[in-house]
Amino acid sequence: MYREILLPTDGGPASEAAVSQAVDLAELSDARLHTLYVVDTSAYPSLDAGAETVMGALREEGQLALDEVSETAEAAGVDVVSEIVSGTPHRRILDYAEANEIDLIVMGTHGRTGLDRYLLGSVTERIVRSAEMPVLTVRAEDE
């Protein structure tokens, strides 16, 4: 069914909701799970002084998120590969998916609608609209 599954994560509740789905699918398919954290450099375009400190903190946050996913995957006997990259999230996710011959992308979503979605944009929505492979979206549980 699937050989390579990608789970982009930002460590937030929407991403956490997608973890169990991605791990279960990888386990059932005997697939490798790729976890990816993108340090969003477009969110901090004007950082001068302290840029290295901020980027370092974001990378540390990313590593913690990837470690959590890896622990869950390894406990289920799933082979996992993790990577942290920098750039514009939707572009880096799509580039990674193409470069690693990903069969399925599993992503969390906040389930925003209307004006919230329009104003905030959505990495998940951009991936759904642009990816050449299937994308499974998992809605975060209500807070």
Image (spheres, rainbow, N blue to C red):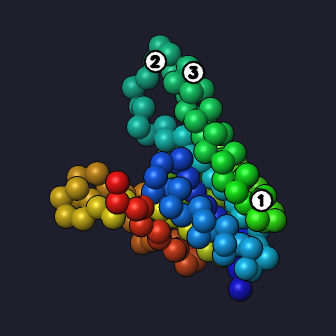
The image quarter containing residue 86 is top right
Place of residue 54 in the rendered image (x, y in percent of width and height, measured from the top left): 52, 24
Q: Which residue is drawn at 72% across and 53% down?
A: 70
Residue 43's place in the image compared with 82, above or below, is: above
Q: Residue at x 71, y 86 (%)?
A: 1
Residue 25's place in the image compared with 74, above or below, is: below
The secondary structure type at the circle numbered 3 is helix
The residue under label 1 is: 75
Q: Can residue 85 be seen in this view?
A: no
Asked if the residue at tag 2 contacts the one at tag 3, i.e. Cβ–Cβ closer than 8 Å, the answer is no
Q: Name which of mark 3 and mark 1 comes first in the sequence.
A: 3
Q: Name which of mark 1 and mark 2 comes first in the sequence.
A: 2
Rate crowding at label 2 as few (under 14), some (14 to 19) or many (20 or more) other CA atoms within 10 Å.
few
Which amino acid type corresponds to the residue marked 2 in the rendered image?
Asp
Q: Distance between the residues labelled 3 and 1?
A: 34 Å
Residue 130's place in the image compared with 2, above or below, is: above
Rate crowding at label 3 as few (under 14), some (14 to 19) or many (20 or more) other CA atoms within 10 Å.
few
Place of residue 81 in the rendered image (x, y in percent of width and height, measured from the top left): 76, 56
The residue under label 2 is: 48
Q: Is residue 75 visible?
A: yes
Q: Give the residue at the far bottom of this rendering.
A: 1
Q: Which residue is drawn at 79% across and 76% down?
A: 30
Q: Residue 52 carries which label?
A: 3
The image quarter containing residue 110 is bottom left
The secondary structure type at the circle numbered 1 is helix
Q: Single out the mark in the foreground, 3 or 2.
A: 3
Q: Name the side, left or right, on which 81 lies relative to 120.
A: right
Q: Which sits in the foreground, 133 or 57?
A: 57
Q: How far apart are marks 1 and 2 (CA)?
A: 41 Å
